[in-house]
Amino acid sequence: MFLPLTLLLCPALLLADIIYLKNGGKIVAPVTKEDTKQIFYEMGGGEFALPRSAVERIEKSAPAPLQPEGSRPSRDLALELPAPPEAAGEEGSAVIHDGAVDEAYLRRLAGEAAHNPSPENLHQLKRAYQQAAVFLSRQGDPDAAILKYREAIKVLPHDQALTLGLGYLLTKQDHYLEALDLLRPEADRYPQSPDFRVLLGSDYYGMEDLDQALVEWNKALTLEDNPRLREAVEKVERERDVSGSYSELRSEHFLLRYEGQQAEKLSGEILNSLEGSFQNLTLDLDYSPSEVIVVILYPTQAFRDITRSPAWVGALNDGKIRVPISGLTVMTPELARVLKHELTHSFIRQITLGRCPTWFNEGMAQIEEGATTAALGTQLARALAAGKIPALASLETPFVDLPQDQVGFVYAKSLAAIEYLRDTFGMGEVRRMLKLMPSSDFNGLLQDELRLSYPAFEQEVTNYIVKRYGS
């Protein structure tokens, strides 16, 4: 099961709205914009869309005031789109033309700033670099955005907004060591900025250095109190208390943490299984994560205490793969299946920059683990034909708040949707859709790639299952 780590690894969400859904669920995330048909919100580093018809009401958080340039940027600007408000947009931008960055314009500004480093020339250059980086990030090319920030920092070293922008992107891409090297000296240079400490804590947390993560987040709290950051600290304190005595085992792509002799006997087999699944997924998804993936094996009660997940959740991926293994003494096909399922979420998180709808993510994880809809085929066909399963458009967010009696069919419907895409358009198209997700909401992606609206896609999936298994 995939859970976006919206609290611990996405500092931009420390100030969030609450979206109450008509199905009884709720989403805690900043609402970025609204129109007559959709509501857009930010989660896991990506922007998602909900049909307005699925929303009961929205409870807005108090907005952080915009501060003039030169003072400490608000958290939304510093950590989500780290630029002054006028630098973040594309309209009227001299550096963005016809859907691309004007490299010649950037070089001209850089030359003028080198010849005459006046405040005005440096400001124009900084603004252009920020606009280019923000544009590239929104287009789903974070590596190119990172390069733009690096180019800017060479000309404008120690600039607070540029450094935070680069640090945020490095953290989002799980480049924790690079982010730490960048941010540590700058955090001392800007001792009154909590944003550096929040990012540093996220990087240490991603590297499984829980003690140092707590040090940095507690420093941030002394600079600016925030209830959500306090919740994050409490969660990591629970995690540290449980896993402080865990042993470690490393392989090329994984850091495995475990406790006790039972897990020690399994750890080598688990790492071998994970490495085999890693190679398979690299081929299947045409992608290879560059950073080490953390996997933690828990006794079942410790898993519940740390994740606070519903009883039906058998494993979890919140940026780290967390698996309860109580009672297991040998590697089993079921455990290998669970591990590959969760590892698929790690791949998809990086491919899509966290912007994959949950149903698509869970469907892909089931496909990769080898599941099919056959076992529930007849029941699924009847439930779909009767409209008894929530629409896919309402399943773009985590499933943890779903009623337990719906969970099985929701997962089956998610799998059915991916089976339909695979069997109708081929896995090449599925991979293409994953790679396009960073730069498009899913409704737009369906229109552009498949020439289908969300309701039409929903109907196609239903027709596919009813035809395959009968009503």
Image (spheres, rainbow, N blue to C red):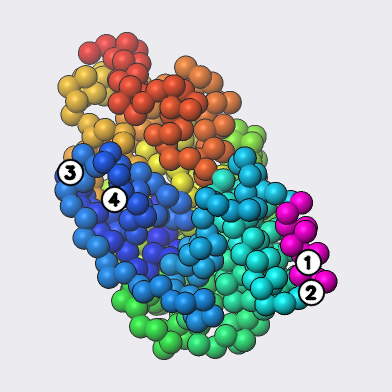
Among the two numbered marks 1 and 4 on one chain, the one whose residue lies closer to the N terminus: 1
Work out whether residue 354 or residue 103 is closer to the camera in this orientation and state it.
Answer: 103
| In front: label 4 or label 3 | 3
Q: Which residue is mark 1?
A: 112
Tag 1: residue type?
Glu
- The span shown in magenta is 104-116
Q: CA distance from mark 2 to mark 4?
A: 57 Å
Whether residue 283 is visible, yes or no, is yes
Look at mark 2 in the image and give the residue it sits on. Answer: 116
Q: CA distance from mark 4 to mark 3?
A: 13 Å
Where is residue 122 drawn, in percent x and y? Answer: 69, 72
Q: Quadrant of the C terminus?
A: top left
Callout 4: helix, strand or loop? loop
Q: Amino acid at mark 3?
A: Asn
Label number found at residue 49: none
Magenta region's main secondary structure? helix
Q: Label 2: state its secondary structure.
A: loop
Badge 3 marks a residue whose secondary structure is loop
Mark 2: amino acid? Asn
N-terminal label among 1 and 3: 3
To which residue does mark 3 refer? 23
Q: Are marks 1 and 2 in contact (CB under 8 Å)?
A: yes
Q: Residues within 10 Å of mark 1 (few under 14, many from 20)?
A: some
Residue holding disc 4: 400
Give the mark nearest the N terminus, 2 or 4.
2
